[in-house]
Image: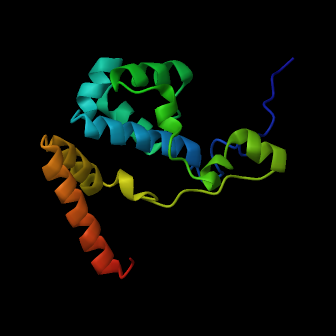
Amino acid sequence: MAFVAKPRRPSSRMASVGKPNPIDVHVGMRVRLRRTLLGMSQEKLGDALGLTFQQVQKYERGANRIGASRLFDLSRVLEVPVAYFYDAMDDDVREQSPGQLHARNQEPVLYETDPDLLTRRESIQLVWFYYQITDEAARRSLFDLASSLAKGYSGKE
């Protein structure tokens, strides 16, 4: 008796075009954000986890899904609770979980590139530099200056 594989419909993990689920992308972005805030290279993170830097890159892009045990290891190396990787997730991303999609019998809506300003290198570096200022009054002054400039630029009060 020969084994014949049944054709598979696209899973909620990957759409038929091969793009990652938005939740996997979000978790990867949070890994990248924390790693960068710690000033850690992809290579150093990979070494701590027994991975190559290319594997870390794939995790950060959401191209490879991060399993529970790996997420646990990441939380320890990056010194954050596991819940950190799911923080700041938009409701529309939450709705793309495989369980939610299955319940509605829908395919995932795919992420566009760079959906979140906090994942940009410039944003991460700015936050990192900000927290390097040890004088609280100086840090607060910089915060107030940035806030004032942003309001003046956007026209918002």
Which residue is rendered at x = 50% and y = 61% of the image? 112
The residue at the far front in this view is 137
Instruction: Tell me: 109 left or right of 114.
Output: right
Q: Position of residue 60 (x, y in %)?
A: 41, 40
Which residue is rendered at x = 18% and y = 58% of the image? 142
Along the viewing direction, whichever of 7 and 64 lies nearer the viewer: 64
Which residue is rendered at x = 24% and y = 62% of the image? 144
Which residue is rendered at x = 27% and y = 39% of the image? 37
Instruction: Tell me: 120 left or right of 92.
Output: left
Up-down relation of residue 6 to residue 70 (above or below)? below
Along the viewing direction, whichever of 123 and 64 lies nearer the viewer: 123
Q: Position of residue 122 (x, y in %)?
A: 25, 56
Q: Is any part of residue 116 visible from this angle?
A: yes
The residue at the far right in this view is 1
Along the viewing direction, whichever of 141 and 4 lies nearer the viewer: 141
Instruction: Tell me: 117 left or right of 23.
Output: left
Quadrant of the drawing holding the C terminus: bottom left
What's the coloring here? Answer: rainbow
Up-down relation of residue 131 to residue 46 (above or below)? below
Q: Position of residue 90 (x, y in %)?
A: 57, 52
Q: Is any part of residue 9 visible from this angle?
A: no
Instruction: Tell me: 54 left or right of 73.
Output: left
What is the quadrant of residue 52 in the picture? Answer: top left
Up-down relation of residue 156 to residue 100 (above or below)? below
Quadrant of the drawing holding the N terminus: top right
What is the quadrant of residue 136 in the picture? Answer: top left
Q: Position of residue 44 (x, y in %)?
A: 24, 26
Q: Across the whole image, how many numbered discs are drawn on residues?
A: 0
